[in-house]
Image: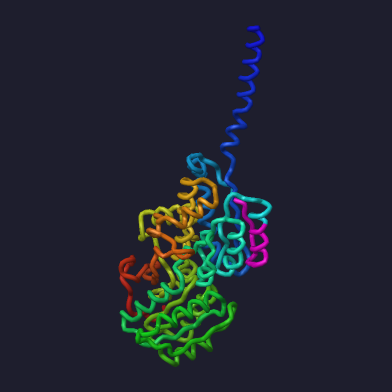
Amino acid sequence: MSNRRSVLQTAAAAAATLALPTLARAQAAPVRIGYTMSRTGPWTTGAQVSQEPSYLLWAEQQNAAGGLNVKGTKRPIELISSDDRSDMETVVRTYEKLMGSDKVDLVLPPWGSGANFAVAPLANRFGYPFLAPTALSRRLIEMKLPYFFLMLQQPKPMCEALVDMFKANGVKTVAVLYTDELFGLENYSAFKVALQGSGLSMVEDKSFPTGSKDLSPVLRAMKDKNPDAFVGFTYPPDTILASRQSKEIGFNPKFFYTSVGTAFPLYRNVMQAGTEGVLGMGSWNSKTSAGAKAFFDAHVKKFGAAKEPDRWASGAAWASLEILTAAVAKVGLDRKAIRDFVAGGEHDTILGKIKFAGSENVGTPGTVGQWQKGEFEVVWPKARATAPLLPVKPNWA
């Protein structure tokens, strides 16, 4: 009898020993996180500066620390990603597969307003929280999708900050150029509303198709009106084109503002000394907070000085991952609980405290940035400024 008991105990111990690696493996099962990103096609510049590097750095940092903290248990992150080729149909089809048949644990958003607009309803239907760092659209807020959160300051606060800065610095006349996509149209509309009652007049306004190769006729017409300020609601290629051609024709108003891409290191690299005094969309730099400096330094260490984070949406991308990390640590991978955590709280990030009203980040105010001596400084509002505004743009260098 004792022999039989001894055999049974030995067998049970052996079975338990065999089960241990399985148990450890089960506990350390990877957290599968899916996304698409533009690695080829026209969206690539923005996607590869503002967004995907942050995803890769985050996963690397979390895994180096033993994995993502899932409600007290460290689990490695497995990124499941693909090139969407800057194609909307590919974006939608891929997210449908990731959330539908692949059933990944979490998803990270794609690049740009248009792609997010296309997949936001899908994410809501499948119940996946989306913290979008590169989407700017009032329409996305008005869709009232409970799983969708926009990290960037939206057109209204951004345009109000810009008009407020113009007013405070004696601007009376402004010329506006805008891309005829959702981004340009919404910002142009918000800017027009912000101008009401400001005492500023719009002396010229023109739209143009994205992908335009020559903006000089429009810029010449604006130069003839001699406005105090130029405002371009532009995407990266348009931002560089408008700046280059303004320099060529000698269009140099006191205030020169362009949008997406202005805060990219690429803009500084292309325009060189001509960047000085150029204004644009931007909400942070390494002086914004200790966390912002740590992120900036880690990014440069991983990707090299030639691939710095931009001073606009890179910060929002990292802040979105900080919020997601905190949510998963608190509530695990229950996506409804993550959604409730994001919607219901105030979150500490490298950009400061962020909170949401519906889909909108109402914690981060509208801001204006400006190139000064090789750094894109936050110059407005003064409470957020990392440097004082240079009130007159020097001549193009």
Which quadrant holds the N terminus?
A: top right
Left or right of 374 in this view: 49: right
- Identify the residue at image location x=59%, y=32%: 23
Residue 35 in the image, given as x and y percentages of width and height = 60, 56
Q: Is residue 347 magenta?
A: no
Residue 179 in the image, given as x and y percentages of width and height = 54, 79
Name above or below for residue 113 compared with residue 393.
above
Q: Nearer the viewer, residue 150 or 253?
A: 150
Q: Residue furthest bottom?
A: 224
Q: Nearer the viewer, residue 216 or 70?
A: 70
Residue 54 in the image, given as x and y percentages of width and height = 50, 56
Question: Magenta span covers which residues?
Answer: 79-96
Q: Is residue 273 visible?
A: no
- Identify the residue at image location x=41%, y=85%: 174
Q: Nearer the viewer, residue 344 or 348?
A: 344
- Identify the residue at image location x=44%, y=64%: 357
Left or right of 388 in this view: 363: right
Left or right of 249 in this view: 228: left
